[in-house]
Image (cartoon, helix red, strand yellow):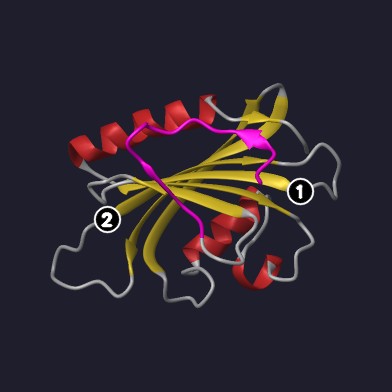
Amino acid sequence: MLSADVAVPEEYERVQEDGEDELVWYADPGGVFEISFWHRDPKSEDTMAHNPGVDPKARKEYYEEGSSSSTDREEASVSYKDATHEGRKAFEMTTEFVPCPSSGDDPVRYRFRELLIPGEKENDPYWHVRVRMPAQGEAAKDGDAIFTEVTEGPKIHAS
């Protein structure tokens, strides 16, 4: 379905919702981490409403504004840098945020580590790999290691 081989930890369970043909995600049995893989058309109808596409500047703005409904995330801190994947131009992003609604005086912060890989041509589908993890503590270090593992693993077969 994704036109790629992906690498995830062995004990993670694959989840795919009915009718969702561009997203596959994997959940760890403990519920701490989540790994998502998208192969998305940049001209899909929901690109601006629900997804800022492969442009890291647009994605940064999207996250800082709280996402699709402006209420999914608050206190978002976003950074990105140029990267490569299989010799192709890519972008690596890190976003720390508090999910909404949050409760308590010291809500748990989360982190997205993402790899965005544009298609070979401007209108080709792009790739989006995301690892969701806690933003602090040993779990954050484990999440960074998982991100390294899963972003080294994908072998793209088609743009």
Q: Is residue 59 above or below residue 46?
A: above
Where is residue 14 shown, x and y percent of the image?
A: 44, 47
Q: Which residues are magenta?
A: 1-16
Nearer to me, 5 or 73 = 5
Q: Residues within 10 Å of mark 2 (few under 14, many from 20)?
A: some
Where is residue 42 shown, x and y percent of the image?
A: 76, 56
Q: Which image quadrant is residue 46 in?
A: bottom right
Q: Which residue is mark 1?
A: 125
Taking the view exactly as shown, the residue that stands out farthest to the front is 18
Where is residue 9 shown, x and y percent of the image?
A: 37, 32
Nearer to me, 121 or 136 = 121
Q: Is residue 125 left or right of residue 132?
A: right
Q: Which image quadrant is residue 141 in?
A: top left
Q: Which image quadrant is residue 45 in?
A: bottom right
Taking the view exactly as shown, the residue that stands out farthest to the top is 87
Q: Residue at x 60, y 46 (%)?
A: 128
Where is residue 38 shown, x and y percent of the image?
A: 60, 49
**Amino acid type of the residue tagged 2 in the rendering:** Arg
Q: Which residue is mark 2?
A: 109
